[in-house]
Every structure is written in structure tokens, then in C-alpha cells.
Image (tube, rainbow, N blue to C red):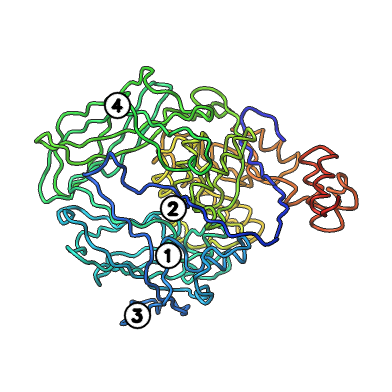
Amino acid sequence: MLKSEHFFCCIFLFVFFLINVGTQAQQAYNHVFNPIKGMVNEVEKPFREELSLNGRWQFMPVYEEDISRFQKPVSFEWDAVPLKVPSPWNVNSFAEGNGGDFLAYPSYPEVWEKAAMGWMKKDFILPEGWDDKQLKLHFEAIAGFAKVYINGQLAGENLDIFFPTEIDATPYVKNGKNELLVGIAKASLTDDKGKYGRRNYVAGSFWGQHIVGIWQDVSLIAIPGLFISDVFVQPDVQKDQLSLVTSITNHTEKARTFTLHTVVRRWEKPATEDVNMAPADNGILREEVLSIEGSSKVKLQAGESITVTLNTKVVGKLKNWTPDDPNLYGAVVRLYTDRMKVTDVRYTRFGWRQFTLKGTQLLLNGEPIVLKGDSWHFMGIPQMTRRYAWGWFRMLKDTHANAVRLHAQPFPSFYLDVADEMGICVLDETGIWSSDGGPKMDSDDYWNYCQKHVKSLVMRDRNHPSVFGWSVCNETLPVAIHVFHAPESIVQRQVDEINNWVNIVKELDPTRAWISGDGETMRPTNLPTVIGHYGDENSIKNWSSQGKPWGVGETGMGYYGTPKQVSKINGNRAYESQLGRMEGLAHRSIRSPSDAAKIRCSLHQCV
């Protein structure tokens, strides 16, 4: 392993399990599967309210693969089995293929796996007192091309897999009972196969390419007409200044005058050794530690938005966020009208910390930090819970690691929440993953979609203190050069687009200097870091000689170690089977002959 003060190294952890397949009694788990709160924080109520639309929806699968025929039916034949939202309706075939050997939803009919389109419906009652609110229909993530109807009217449509789809539902919702109808076609139905790829959208890796359906939470959210639309917390530890870039939108029919006031309170999570309770989303706000007075009154015309920046010196009132002490705070911004009446409240959690680059070093709060961690693809339903994120990060902490690369797609945002709380530094990666040869590299539509995708990732995650940097892509240049053998014009377009993504990140997030492209070492780019994949000694010398922070994003003989190489560790066993090769790698990792012998005995059940 490289020894340096300035590299990011992702370590693939290979763990061997001996599974007893014997008959076991069924166990009931009496805790919430994914212990997570909703989109509206308690301190934001009653100015903001939320109606969860998760649960059982009616479902009609469509076994048609012509996207031009994806139209709202005249009549519906609903399946007797309800669809459980959030979940992809084809999730079980992923488990049998690229995922694990389990059924995530045993009740789902097997034939659903063949449905490339589907329609789903849920009725809901508008809560009392919401008729004078702005209503946002918020899907945290829909996989596929979606059409959304509210009470029979087309309210919106979108093609995406990973990011929120938010629709202004105000014109369509009525008092009393309402009908929400969503049609979704698998994203791959929009593919346009050519010489240099087929996808004009960003699909990430295995999970994103397979699934179709509403796979994250959906809610109807009520907000006031004059509201805080965004808060970007910018901690500058070097200058001892905390800034809150606050956006306000006026959806009322007349001009409004407002002022802002912010209090910062300490965030605390109850300490516990109970593995059932530790992952729970149960943090609370404690005492006020800072107060930020807003500017003088601001007038905002009807239908307009404005951005107001609130600044204050910290002067020791906030403790640093670090992997060892992940201190967190909640900024509560209150919006007052000209009558000094509170109109809206917006809550944003953050940490007082600053990641910077100095020469070839990554610094946290002015001090060099070495990042050691793990990386893996998102692999489905078992990972759709804070419990999985907590267990993964707890394992890393127990092995004295402090970082993770959320690989090949944007993970659900609660992964960032848990990392904030546990002190795990996150390299936040887009779904611009080309290793399967899918992206349509000669298409303007694809490159435009990529730019939108990078923007969405930064806007969603930039308030998380755990995010030390952004990985804008993964192995796109190697695919263009070595897989497609693309002409230099396409390779150069890839370089230009990487540089465009760098500019987008810098514009949307001036607080982080780390921007990387994992495995993008085959051409010079404007990336301020160098992250290599699967190189030899000469590669490492090249990566480390460019005067930039550098590191190894992916490596390990688990992928490319030949039996000949592994046989130096465990002899002919490396040639006998894949199992024998992996035994040798385990021996190498443990570096103890006796421990390796124990592993061999366990795998062969010897005594």
C-alpha cells in the first residue's frame, strides 16, 4: 500500500463467510427497517407540512417494449397484488442476477420482472388547512421515464434514475379526495444504439441500469407562498466566517417585504450501544450557540426569487467537525414578513469544517489528513436503509478507516446523513460510469444530460460536512480509448466535458477544492487531482509526479491477480479453482500462515 500524506486510497475489503444452510426458525424483527424521518423537520412545522405517500399502490404492469406506445390507457386492469412504494417492481430479478441470492419482495409475481412499463395509482385526502398552501409533489427518486397525473391531468414528466423529481401540484390538487397516477417506462426503452454507445441518460452501474419504478420516498409537501427555497451553508474555518446563502421565492400574487433571522443550535444524537437504535434518525437540537441577524427589509416582486447572504464570525462558538469528533449543528432560518410575522422556517444541518488543497496535500481544518477507506457499487434493497449505512461505516471505523467512495452512482441521501453523524469522509460520485460501454459518446443529448446530472448531485449534497470532494466520473476515457477505439474527436469531446463538469462543480460549490475523475489518467484535464485505477509501479510514479494530490481509487488482486501471481502465496491451490485463488488473496491480506490455514479449513470444513 502507498504510504503518503496526500492520497485517497479506496481499499476493497473481501470478507469470507461460512454459511450454515440448515433449517432455522423464522425470526421477527421488531424494529423499523429504515428508521428515517420525513422531508419536513419538526422545527419547520407548522409552516411546512408533509403527507407521506409511501405504502401500497395499485399497479398495472405493461408488457410492451415500444416507448412510442407509452400513453395513458383509457382503462386500467389493476393487479390483485399491490405495489409497495418505494420499491422497483422488477427488484427480484436484480437479486437473482447481479445482486444477492434472495427475494426482496416475495409477494411480487414473477411475471412482473418482464414488465418494461407500468402504471401505479394511489388516492389521498388533502389534509385540512392545506388549501391555501403551495403544494410540492416530491419523489426522492424515480427510475425511468415517468409521467405524473394528478386528478387526470398531466402534472409533469421526467427521465431520471437517481435524483428528486419535484412537481408543483398546486393547480391540480383539490380539497377532499385526490388521485395520483404515475406511469413509468424503463429508461433503457429510450436507448438509441450506435457505434459509440446507446444511452442518452446517466444510468450509473448495475442497480441503476436494471431497476424501474419509484424506488425512494414520495411525499406531498405544503409550504407557504413566500418561502425559503434553498440554504447553502458555507463554513470558512480559515477566515472564521460562517455564511448562509439563502434563496427566497415569492409564489404569491403580490409583492412581499421580508427580513431573515437565523439561529444555530447544537445537534445531538442520543448515545447508545444498542445496534437496533444506533442507526435511528433520532437526533435533536439542543442549545442555541449562534445568532445571525438578517439584513434590512427586502422587497420581492410576485413570481420572483432572490438570494440573500447571511454572514457571521464564529469566534470559537462552533466545534470543528472531524472524523474523530463529528460535531454537527442545525441552522434554523426564519423568514419574517413586513408585519414581523414568521412566514416560513427552513432547517439545514451542517458541520463547522473546511477541506482544502495545499500543493499535493488534502487538508481538513488546516491540517493534513490521510483518507483510508472502502468503495463499492450500490447493490439494492438491503442497502436501502440507514441500518446498512451505519453497519458499513461502523465496520470502517472499527478497522481505523475514515473514508468511503460512494461508487458509480449517487447513493440515497441518507448515506450522507449517516456519514455526517459518524465521521466518515465521503467522495461523492456521479453516475457517469462508462465501464459497460453504454453512454452514447457521440450524442449532444448525452453530454447535456451529464451536465444536468453533475449539477443535481452538487445541489443535493453540498451541505453535508462529510463530503470532502466530488468525483465527476469513472473510467470514461479508458472506455472511449480502449473499448470503443473512438476517434480523437470523441476522445477530445470527453476531455472537454470533464473540464465542463469541473467548472460546474466550482460554480455551484466554491467551498471544496477536491474534484476528481476516478481512473481518468489517460489524457491531461483540468481536474485538480489525479486518481488512478489498477496501475503498476510505473503508473504510480506517473500519478505521483504531477504536482497534484493523488491517490488510488481502485486496485486489488481480487480483480486482476492471476493464478501465477497468487501461487507465490499458496502454491498450486491458486491454480485449482477461483476458491483457491481467493484463499491466496486472503492469506496475503492476513499475512499470517496460521490464519490462512484456518480460512482454508473453514472453507473446506476440515477439522
Q: Quadrant of residue 333?
A: top left
What's the distance in space between the residues labelled 4 and 2, CA to CA?
30 Å
Q: Earlier in the sequence, mark 4 or mark 1?
A: 1
Q: Earlier in the sequence, mark 3 or mark 2?
A: 3
Pair 4/1: label in front: 1
Q: Amino acid at mark 1?
A: Lys
* Residue 525 drawn above or below residue 118: above
Pair 4/2: label in front: 4
Q: Residues within 10 Å of mark 4 (few under 14, many from 20)?
A: some
Say which residue label 4 marks. 311
Pair 3/4: label in front: 3
Q: Secondary structure at mark 3?
A: loop
Residue displayed at 70% across by 33% down: 2
Say which residue label 2 marks. 453
- x then y, percent, for residue 373: 61, 38
Say which residue label 1 marks. 84
Q: Amino acid at mark 2?
A: His
Question: Contact, CB < 8 Å: mark 4 with mark 1?
Answer: no
- x then y, percent, for residue 119: 38, 73
Query: Outermost residue toward the right?
Result: 572
Q: Secondary structure at mark 2?
A: helix
Residue displayed at 61% across by 36% down: 8
What's the distance in space between the residues labelled 3 and 2, CA to CA?
34 Å
What's the distance in space between the residues labelled 1 and 2, CA to CA?
27 Å
